[in-house]
Image: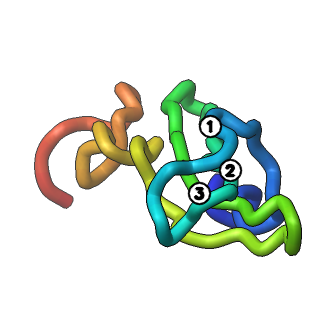
Amino acid sequence: MTLKAAYLGEGEEIIANLSDPRYSGMYKMELKTTSKNGKHSLVHYVKDPQTGELMDFKFKRHSNDDVKPWGNDPSVPPGGF
């Protein structure tokens, strides 16, 4: 859901006029979200302010980074099936 929202251009500008020659004059954008279980996701991407084109999407933190294979729900007993 976080990446989908970033693809739609949600987020905030964190750096104007990037110095990387590939993205000169473009903005670095950031979208932060929190999942229902309180986990945080963070996506950075680049926006061309003249065309509105969005590119170079990268997860910097994903809400499932700390999730165990069966989740972190304490009501789920440890062990196999």
Q: Can residue 32 be seen in this view?
A: no
**Label 3 belongs to which residue?**
45
Of badges 3 and 1, nearer the viewer stands 1
Q: Report the quarter where the C terminus lies.
A: bottom left
Residue 15's tag is 1
- 3 or 38, which is in the foreground? 3
From the viewer's perspective, is 13 left or right of 62?
right
Amino acid under disc 1? Ile
Q: In this view, does 36 lie above or below 59?
A: above
Amino acid under disc 2? Tyr
Q: In which quarter of the image is residue 59?
A: bottom left
Q: What element carries label 2?
A: strand
**Label 2 belongs to which residue?**
27
Residue 3's tag is none
- Circles 1 and 2, Cβ within 8 Å, touching? The answer is yes
Q: Is residue 21 above or below residue 25?
A: below
The image position of residue 54, as x and y in percent, is 71, 69
Q: Distance between the residues labelled 3 and 1?
A: 11 Å
